[in-house]
Image (cartoon, grey):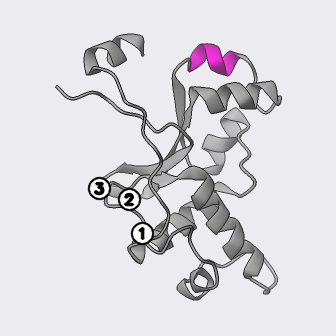
Amino acid sequence: MSPIRTPRKRAYYPTSPNEKDRLLLWIPKDELEGMVQEDLLPPSVLEDFPRGMEVEVSPAGFEELGIDVGISPEAISATYGLLAETGKVSKSGLADGAALEGVARGIADTDDTPGPPRFTLEALDRVSPPTDRGVPEPEMADGEEAQTFLRRL
């Protein structure tokens, strides 16, 4: 059996191949520790999620844990959808968290119309993803054997 690998940094990905419009966010242990140190999350999060945390990218999912990445979960989901539609997300579906959030902020910042930002292909054209191929995949940890990984959950 091949090792289970997880992203080293924040990463977004679809909940499943059949539900590409619903996203999950992976926050690795190191980032959780930093968020606790900055008083962005309560220390109990590290006790509950000692290896990292997966959360639904939705207002309820972010609100439950008090997650604030500087852009709304709706904006992140809409941006991911546009990037995926234009082939700017890898086939794996994994998107580097900071890069995706940066593109989402850029789209929101370039929209001059009143009201909430509108996410269109035209808005995406005004913001360059981090690479010509789109949002990069996050770097992955070496991983560990599935049996060891599952024992620790």
Question: Disc 1 to disc 2, how far (Cα)?
Answer: 9 Å
> At 21% across and 29% down in the image, what residue appears?
2
SS type, badge 1 = helix
Q: In this view, does 149 lie to the left or right of 23?
A: left
Q: Quadrant of residue 99?
A: bottom right
Q: Is the magenta stretch mostly helix, strand or loop?
A: helix
Tell me which amino acid carries mark 3.
Answer: Asn
Q: Give residue 100's position: percent from left, percent from top.
A: 58, 60
Q: Which residue lies furthest to the left in this view?
A: 1
Question: Disc 3 to disc 2, how far (Cα)?
Answer: 6 Å
All told, the count of numbered labels is 3
Which image quarter holds the N terminus?
top left
Which of the two discs, 3 and 1, labels the residue nearer the N terminus?
Answer: 3
Q: Quadrant of residue 61?
A: top right
Q: Give residue 73's position: percent from left, percent from top.
A: 63, 55
In the picture of the structure, the residue carrying the numbered disc 1 is: 84
User: Circles 1 and 2: CB distance less than 8 Å?
Assistant: yes
Which mark is nearer the camera, 1 or 2? 1
In the picture of the structure, the residue carrying the numbered disc 2 is: 20
Front one among 23 and 35: 35
Mark 1 nearby-residue class (10 Å; few <14, some 14–19, many ≥20): some
> At 54% across and 27% down in the image, what residue appears?
52
Q: In this view, does 40 lie above or below 18?
A: above
Which image quarter holds the C terminus?
top left
In the picture of the structure, the residue carrying the numbered disc 3 is: 18
Q: Give residue 66's position: percent from left, percent from top.
A: 73, 37
